[in-house]
Image (spheres, rainbow, N blue to C red):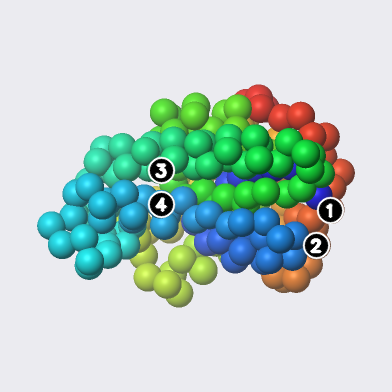
């Protein structure tokens, strides 16, 4: 297609991973989920039993926010290296879509990680309504940062805060409200096709 590294950003359960996998499958690109990289780094460097893989939710709950943000930054640096290598390898095929990356929903709160992403690839913010996203989260079980009293109030606060960050960093803001998965994928592909190749600004 047109870009060697596509970064999908958005609030938790906005469709980053599901759309990212389908986009990669459709275009022949590789797919990376930032959460997988975080879990791999934890398993490789910190876990008492590397063969027992902990999920991001468990790592966050057990190790705390600061520790998790450090892992997240390490994962972003790994992805940056991968995207750089893809750019070098695809020099002879500039219209290829090399790597699709689904970022974590809370990366907006990690200033150092966001700065590393600032000049990396085409950043697409998958936007949706707060109520829709919260309903999806509820069906999967509340994450640690929404547990306790008034989870919806907590969610609205982080939704507003993170939306501002994503809008500031995004090269493309794609509103998916009311769209099903197939329609969302087509909208995503069209937005990439219509986007200029040169990116790398905070918006």
Q: Residue furthest right?
A: 194
Determine whether the residue tagged by mark 4 lies in a helix, strand or loop.
Answer: helix
166 vs 81, nearest the viewer: 81
> In which quadrant of the rendered view does residue 170 lie?
top right
Q: CA distance from mark 1 to mark 2?
A: 6 Å
Q: CA distance from mark 4 to mark 3?
A: 6 Å
Whether residue 49 is situated above or below residue 141 in the rendered picture = above
Residue bearing the label numbered 1 = 190
Report x, y in % for residue 68.
29, 44
Determine whether the residue tagged by mark 1 lies in a helix, strand or loop.
Answer: helix
Q: Is residue 140 left or right of residue 165?
A: left
> In which quadrant of the rendered view does residue 133 lie?
bottom right
Determine whether the residue tagged by mark 2 lies in a helix, strand or loop.
Answer: helix
Residue bearing the label numbered 3 = 75
82 vs 5, nearest the viewer: 82
Badges 4 and 3: C-beta atoms under 8 Å apart? yes
Residue bearing the label numbered 4 = 37
């Amino acid at each position: 297609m047109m870009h060697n590294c596509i970064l999908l950003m958005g609030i938790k359960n906005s469709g980053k991973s599901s759309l990212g996998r389908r986009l990669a499958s459709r275009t022949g690109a590789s797919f990376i989920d930032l959460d997988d990289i975080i879990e791999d780094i934890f398993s490789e460097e910190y876990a008492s039993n590397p063969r027992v893989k902990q999920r991001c939710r468990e790592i966050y709950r057990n190790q705390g926010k600061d520790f998790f943000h450090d892992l997240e930054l390490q994962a972003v640096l790994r992805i940056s290296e991968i995207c750089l290598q893809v750019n070098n390898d695809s020099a002879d095929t500039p219209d290829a879509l090399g790597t699709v990356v689904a970022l974590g929903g809370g990366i907006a709160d990690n200033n150092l990680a966001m700065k590393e992403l600032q000049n990396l690839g085409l950043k697409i913010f998958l936007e949706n309504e707060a109520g829709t996203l919260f309903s999806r989260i509820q069906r999967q079980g509340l994450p640690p940062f929404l547990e306790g009293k008034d989870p919806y109030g907590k969610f609205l606060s982080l939704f507003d805060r993170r939306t501002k960050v994503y809008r500031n960093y995004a090269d493309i803001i794609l509103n998916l409200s009311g769209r099903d998965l197939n329609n969302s994928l087509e909208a995503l592909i069209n937005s990439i096709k219509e986007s200029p190749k040169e990116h790398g600004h905070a918006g």
